[in-house]
Image (cartoon, rainbow, N blue to C red):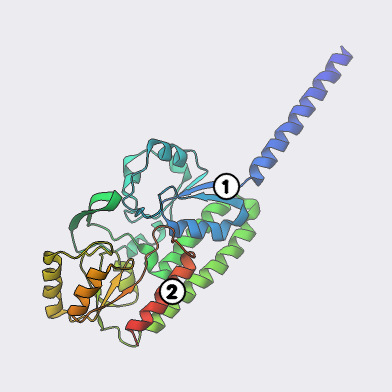
Amino acid sequence: MLLQACRFRCVALLIGILFIGISVNAADSPLNVYVVNYPLKYFAERIGGPHVRVTLPVPAGEDPVYWTPTIADIAAYQNADLILLNGAGYAKWVSKVSLPRAKIVDTSQGFKDRFITGTEILTHSHGAEGEHAHEGLAFTTWLDLSLAAKQAEAVADALARKRPQQEDLFRTNFRSLEKDLLGLDDRIRSTVSSDNDLPIIFSHPVYEYFEHAYRLNGRSVHWEPDQDPSPDQVAELKKVLETHPAEWMVWEGVPNKPAIDVLKALGIESTVFNPCGNAPRKGDFLSVMQQNVTKLGKIFR
């Protein structure tokens, strides 16, 4: 009887040790984080370091805001430890599927009073995304770099709640990221301050937060960098130029030669300000934004 009791205690002790070991390993393993765009991936990786494994399943070259996930992609989101959303209507598919609410963090919820309602309703079709419309809330919130810093802070808060033992590291990493983002914000303000009234054409209606934050005098058309402009698009641009005599068009990506030639004939030069919604081919979010600001210097001389 005594021997049986001893064996029972030994087994219970071994089970307890095994359970503690599993718990410690789970607490030390990287958080499985799924995101809906590249800026959030960059923020989470900068803040979480080796304590996170961040996944953006959107294929290269596709716009995450209009991407449609497969059933397997949705299951992967559901099984993540943390799901980081951009908010402001970004990633249209999110509202159509069931995701665990306890795992979701809307990184723009804290400044929803600063959301911008789009004034244009443009429906068009291109690439893998198919037909979609630009209407309702503007969603590229991170192009106001001060709002990007707030989104990064929401990421840091979420990671700290999941891994409180790493909170000091997360806060330190966030402060470093915040310094970089607000430094870019200051640099943009300094670059454009020489002439905020300068007319600019934006090739795509995704720059609302950028225009508003830095008080730019912009108008949007809808030209794709990989497509030749149609006669209707050229006619529309000429109409805009009658009251908005811009000498520069800002593109999401490098435009093709026919587009450049058409614009030059109208006295308009081209430059790129990459919104960086998906991962860039080279560099990272910070380096792309630094390049963007440098290119702005060509316009605001």
Location of residue 219 in the rendering, given as x and y in whole percent from the top left corner: 22, 72
Circle 1 SS class: strand
Horizontal arrangement in the rendering, residue 261 relative to residue 32 (left or right): left
Whole-percent x, y for residue 227 in the image? 24, 62
Specify the amino acid type for callout 1. Leu
Q: Position of residue 187 (x, y in %)?
A: 44, 80
What residue do we see at 19% from left, 62% from top?
Answer: 120
Secondary structure at numbered mark 2: helix
Residue 191, picture quadrant: bottom left
**Quadrant of the snapshot with the N terminus:** top right
Find residue 97 and report its image quarter.
top left
Say which quadrant the C terminus sits in: bottom left
> 253 or 157, which is in the foreground?
253
Seen from this angle, which residue lies furthest right?
A: 2
Q: Name the mark nearer the viewer: 1 or 2.
A: 2
Q: Upstream in the sequence, badge 1 or badge 2? A: 1
- Determine crowd level at label 2: few under 14, some 14-19, many 20+ residues with C-alpha closer than 10 A: some
Q: Is residue 139 above or below residue 241?
A: above
Q: Position of residue 94 (x, y in %)?
A: 35, 45
Label for residue 291?
2
Q: Residues within 10 Å of mark 1 (few under 14, many from 20)?
A: many
Residue underneath mark 1: 31
Q: Is residue 170 visible?
A: yes
Relative depth, front residue between 237 and 29 = 237
Name above or below for residue 177 compared with residue 122. Answer: below
User: In the drawing, does residue 43 fall left or right of residue 26?
Assistant: left
Horizontal arrangement in the rendering, residue 132 relative to residue 80 (left or right): left
- Rendered residue at 57%/68% (across/down): 176
CA gap between label 1 and label 2 equals 31 Å
- Residue 202 visible in rendering: no
Query: Can you say whether 271 is above or below 134 in the image?
Result: below
